Image (cartoon, rainbow, N blue to C red):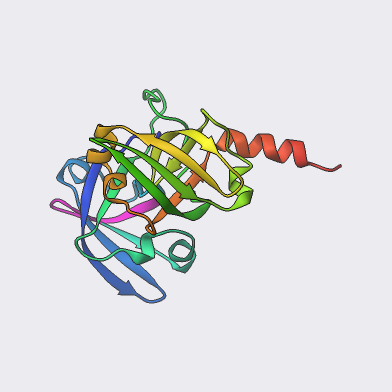
């Protein structure tokens, strides 16, 4: 589990083709210094396992399913990603419960900057917006955000200057793809309400 509070905005050093998947090599001295092989780390909100740690670099393997269902398959050397280490029992939960299992890839529809602040509209599949409510939670590229407005196939979020500076969201422009994960509690509520015995 994760909280959606990004710990490091880190560069992709290399993307290496590995059979049907890829190996992502990401540089973050802060995260690498306290990570070990086998640790779960969220990359743009997608939970992956660290398979190698060397100096300030961590390596992760992503298979075809992950590449198809997330924006990780579009990454290139030099791109920035959001990193978050997994939540430990007893840790403070500053964001919301995030599983690291991406529901869908959304797309930035519109961005309205107001000085150092920003409002952003994002397209999302209708089956996901049914799990959203104004003032509820959403993880966008692994960033825990509060929903402002929710419509049938899109939603909006308000981004503060810190979020824009410390995460990939500050670099996102209309047309860019983002990983989406709806609130896990909303999933269970929807499941119970739609259950037919």
Asked if residue 53 lies in the magenta stretch, the reply is yes
Quadrant of the rendered structure where residue 139 is?
A: top left
In percent of width and height, residue 17 lies at: 31, 74
Please say whether residue 2 is visible from this viewpoint.
no
Of 4 and 85, which appears nearest the observer?
A: 4
Residue furthest right as drawn? 197
Of 194 and 57, which appears nearest the observer?
A: 194
Quadrant of the rendered structure where residue 191 is?
A: top right
Magenta span of residues: 47-58
In percent of width and height, residue 80 lies at: 24, 53
Residue 182 versus residue 104 in the image, above or below: above
Please say whether residue 39 is visible from this viewpoint.
yes
Asked if residue 91 lies in the magenta stretch, the reply is no
Residue 26 versus residue 3 in the image, above or below: below
Horizontally, is 13 left or right of 126 in the view?
left
In percent of width and height, residue 185 lies at: 59, 33
Residue furthest bottom as drawn? 19
**Quadrant into which the C terminus falls:** top right
Q: What residue is at 18 percent from the left and 48 percent from the top?
A: 28
Horizontally, is 75 left or right of 107 in the view?
left
**Quadrant into which the N terminus falls:** top left
Q: What residue is at 84 percent from the left and 43 percent from the top?
A: 196
Q: How many marks?
A: 0
Residue 5 versus residue 105 in the image, above or below: above
Q: What residue is at 14 percent from the left and 51 percent from the top?
A: 56
Of 50 and 118, which appears nearest the observer?
A: 118
Q: What secondary structure is the stretch in magenta mostly built from? A: strand
């Amino acid at each position: 589990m994760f909280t959606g509070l990004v710990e490091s905005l880190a560069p992709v050093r290399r993307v290496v083709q590995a059979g049907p998947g890829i190996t992502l090599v990401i540089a973050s001295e802060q995260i690498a210094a306290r990570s070990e092989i086998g640790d779960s780390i969220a990359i743009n909100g997608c939970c992956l396992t660290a398979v190698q740690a060397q100096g300030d670099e961590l390596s992760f393997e992503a298979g075809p399913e992950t590449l198809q269902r997330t924006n990780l398959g579009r990454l290139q050397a030099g791109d920035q990603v959001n990193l978050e280490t997994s939540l430990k029992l007893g840790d403070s939960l500053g964001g919301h419960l995030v599983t690291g299992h991406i529901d869908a890839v959304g797309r930035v529809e519109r961005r309205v900057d107001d000085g150092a602040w920003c409002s952003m509209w994002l397209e999302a599949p209708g089956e996901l917006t049914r799990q959203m409510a104004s003032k509820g939670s959403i993880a966008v590229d692994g960033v825990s955000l509060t929903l402002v407005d929710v419509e049938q196939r899109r939603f909006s979020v308000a981004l503060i200057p810190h979020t824009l500076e410390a995460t990939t969201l500050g670099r996102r422009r209309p047309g860019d793809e983002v990983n989406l994960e709806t609130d896990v509690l909303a999933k269970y509520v929807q499941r119970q309400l739609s259950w037919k015995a």
